[in-house]
Amino acid sequence: MTALLVLLAIIVLAGFLVVGAYNRLVALRQNANEAFADIDVQLKQRQDLVPNLVETVKGYAAHERGTLEEVTQARAVAVGATGVEQRAQAENALTGALGRLMAVAEAYPDLKANQNFLQLQGELADLENKIAAARRFFNNAIAEYNAAIQRFPAVLLAGAFGFQARDFFDVGADRQAMQTAPQVKFS
Amino acid sequence: MQAIGLQTYIWNNNIRSAVLLVGFPILLIGMVFFLTLGMIWAGMLPPGEAYGGDVNEALGLMWGAAPAAIIVAAIWFVIAYFFNETIIDFATGSRQLTREEEPRAYNLLENLCISRGLNMPKLRVIETDEMNAFASGLHDGRFSVTVTRGILASLDDRELEAVLGHELTHIINRDVRTMVIAAIFAGIITLICQIIYRSIMWGGFGGLRGRRGNVGVFILVAMVVGAVGYLLAIVIRMAISRTREYVADAGSVELTKNPDAMISALRKVSGHAHLDAPASMRAMFLEDDDDGIFGLFATHPPVEKRIAALVQFGGGRDLAPTPAPTPPPEPISRPAPGTDDGPWGAHGAQRLAQDDGPAGPWS
């Protein structure tokens, strides 16, 4: 009788532990999902800003067709991208293209004096900062989730309930390019 | 469980707070138990043979006294529940702000509330140059976030948002309620201690029931129990307060996604946060640097530790604080000759804002 009760107690306790561990994993996964939704909002806003920016620049620097088309292309790819890794790549390409566009714009004093352009430039810089912050938060949440599913005892549950390690939203190969200042040559 | 990120860190601190909070009733029961035991030893109460030993008798007497203690605590709580906010607003001399008066802070707070689906708490201000902020109110509809004029003036948008996020987390977590409960427990324990010392002073126990009991023993026990209980009550209360601060810092990062802003806000506020207020209120402040002895009696952890936690668990970077924000754009007029208002004046601030931190590669 006593042995049965002890056994029952152990089973109930184990049940609580399993439920607790499972719920924690779900909460962490949800946390990561929400964090990605936050990045998504900022990225969407930047995508919406691009056509305006391209139009404005076109008014002053129409013959910079290559750069303008590159930005439009990159935006189209970014809009169509799905999945964390693909999106990260597409958005990085867009970041790079926008950077080149802004560098080109430096050569047009009239454009730089345009109020509309200045406003868009400000908005873009603000969005870039917000994207950077949201991305850091997301990566942090992913790191926590990935660590949690590999720890004992959660690791015993993670596989069975389909908790898999997630990808980071990486700046990837472009990180190098973003961190080194552009070379200016006078020749 | 060891914290591995922001979320687990918040959970851990919440568990720690709960454990500490449970410590109060245990402490209270323990004190009453030892006092009763002391009275039995001193022969002031009938010896316990008839009840199966001294300890059992003390336990029995203690349960008899429990309802009275619960009623006192309940009345205390009801009063605090309805008047907490009024008392605090009166004590600090704050007044309510409208959106028109302070659109920047109001909008930041409103955006944070929208993102968490909260009713907008009242925004209040204290007109002082010191930099601090606190949350008050015990139930929905009475919540308010109070900031000082100094903090509004010297933090930029991101830092102010982080500070508001910190206070809003206190509200979301109902920390004010937790701290009021802690204050009530600590209050009851203090009350018991005062009764003990008054009684000893007035020799009240000597004539108790006309017994010949060994009063010296009881006085000794009572003094030890009183002193230990009193100290432990304060230590527990302050430890709860500190865990709530860590959670609020982390919660602010969750709301704003920006650990750097919280760090630089703490750096700016540190050392300029002094507001005169009783300890129970200071516990709700953004920052309070009155450490007491070895930090055991501090309502807030040291700023360095808070920043270290933000770096470790929140992914923050400890950068130099950003300069004061640009004042609301005024029509650009050429500065009148001879109005050199120093680096912190309106023009100086605009000049400083031009190299305003990492503002993206093309700003």
Image: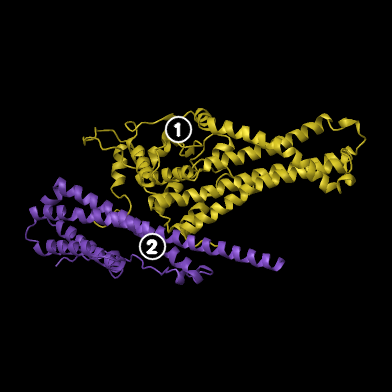
Chain colours: A purple, B yellow
Q: CA distance from mark 1 to mark 2?
A: 40 Å
Q: Secondary structure at mark 2?
A: helix
* Residue B211 in which image quadrant: top right
Question: What type is the residue that disc 2 sits on?
Answer: Asn
Q: Nearer the viewer, residue B182 or A173?
A: B182
On whether disc 1 and disc 2 are found on a single subunit, the reply is: no
* Residue farthest to the front, as pictured: A1
Q: Work out whether A17 lies above or below A111.
A: below
> Residue at image x 76%, y 42%?
B62
Name the side, left or right, on which B261 lies relative to B359. Answer: right
**Badge 1, how many Cα within 10 Å: few under 14, some, many 20+?**
some
> Residue at image x 34%, y 34%?
B102
Q: What residue sits right under mark 2 in the picture?
A: A139
Name the side, left or right, on which B55 lies relative to A65. Answer: right
- Can I make out residue A138 in this image? yes
> Residue at image x 59%, y 35%?
B77
Q: Work out whether A114 lies above or below A183.
A: above
Q: Nearer the viewer, residue A82 or A69?
A: A82
Q: Which mark is residue A182?
A: none
Q: Chain of mark 2?
A: A
Residue A158 location, x and y as percent?
A: 46, 69
- Can I make out residue B297 in this image? no
Quadrant (top left/top right/bottom left/bottom right) for the N terminus of chain B: bottom right
Residue B176 location, x and y as percent?
A: 53, 40
Q: What residue sits right under mark 1 in the picture?
A: B128
Question: What type is the residue that disc 1 sits on?
Answer: Thr
* Residue farthest to the right, as pictured: B212
Name the side, left or right, on which B17 lies relative to B36. Answer: left
Q: Work out whether B228 lies above or below B88.
A: below
Q: Secondary structure at mark 1?
A: loop
Name the side, left or right, on which A100 lies relative to B8. Answer: left
